[in-house]
Amino acid sequence: MNYPKPVSGLTVGIDIGGTKVLGGVVDTSGNILESLRKDTPKTGGQDLINVVIEIVKTLQANHKIVGIGVSNAGIVSADRRTVVAAGNISNWNNVALADALQSEFDLPVVVENDANAAIWAEYRFGNAKGLNPVMFFIIGTGMGGGLIVDGKLYRGANGIGAEFGHMMVKLDGERCGCGAIGCIETYASGSALMRYAHEAIKADAQGAKSLLDFGDGTINGFTGKDLTKAAQAGNAMALSAFAKQSDWVGSAIASYTMLLDPEAIIIGGGVIDAGDLFLKPAITAAEKYMPFADKHPLPKIIAAKFGNDAGLIGAGDLVRE
Ligand SMILES: [Zn+2]
């Protein structure tokens, strides 16, 4: 069914991730008026659709809603109606999510890849405003990507465009969650950062004691937050793990600059919590690896404005687009 595009009014933005579903009422300035969070059901599929429906109904009770935008971790069809594949949610392949929500609520619905939704939030209301072209790395457990050219999200022919985390950089390297080998995600993501820390801990159990003391003292209980704390306090082992990750991110900045010549690259995701600890060495590495280095300016490297809410804010706005 075709709906006229709502040009104005409140929408519900939903962000579906592997562990949680966030929902919020989003106004035309990107503010969240009311929000809600539920666990992602382990069974996925229809149970997950039901959770989304429940969230929308709850939010709708207090607000007049003109559309629903869904940000989904995974690949979404180019027509923005179907979840094609999601690595870490069960029974979440080839799900006609937009149709299901539309028949329930009789409102326009768009479904978008989570990184695309997040960069859209940055472009409309955050730190990517007015930049063209502007690209986005979202570096958390994995490494998502997004690209906006001339004010439009670049999706490609099949909805898999701008998946910047899956550029192959080491053909005999690590197996990636996508099935390929040696993707940049396996070297530049938060998971890679933790792998570097674990490798260092195992290689020097004695030296690692002071690092592990930033957590609960055990390697299994040692978290990303503990690692960031340790690096901020100047722990050499933690700083070396960050340096490895930043180096790979810098190489990605250099490669993608030659491919797309962006005015700016926005970096979001959990890694931004480390602030300059991560950004400064990444910029230094980008300068070090940049082809034709002294012949052109480096794109601006900017931390994202929005954190966990980016997906739902962007998705909520995309249904007005
Ligand atoms: Zn990959």
Image (cartoon, rainbow, N blue to C red):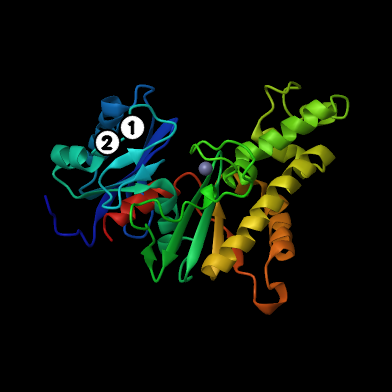
Q: Looking at the image, which residue is at 22% across and 62% down?
A: 7
Q: What is the number of the mark on residue 95?
A: 2
Q: Residue furthest front?
A: 172
Quarter-of-image position of residue 285: bottom right
Please, what secondary structure does the residue beneath circle 2 have? loop
Answer with left or right where residue 321 lies relative to residue 105.
right
Q: Residue 47, position in %: x, y?
A: 28, 25
Farthest-out residue, left:
1
| Amino acid type of the residue tagged 1 in the rendering | Trp
Disc 2 + disc 1, Cβ < 8 Å: yes
Q: To which residue does mark 1 refer?
A: 92
Asked if residue 148 is positioned above or below residue 37 in the image, the reply reads below
Kindly tell me whether mark 1's CB lies below 8 Å from ligand 1. Answer: no
Q: Amino acid at mark 2?
A: Val
User: Above or below — where is 247 with respect to 262?
Assistant: above
Q: Residues within 10 Å of mark 1 (few under 14, many from 20)?
A: many
Q: The C terminus appears in which quarter of the rendering?
A: bottom left
Classify 10 Å Cα crowding around label 2: few (below 14), some (14-19), many (20 and above): some
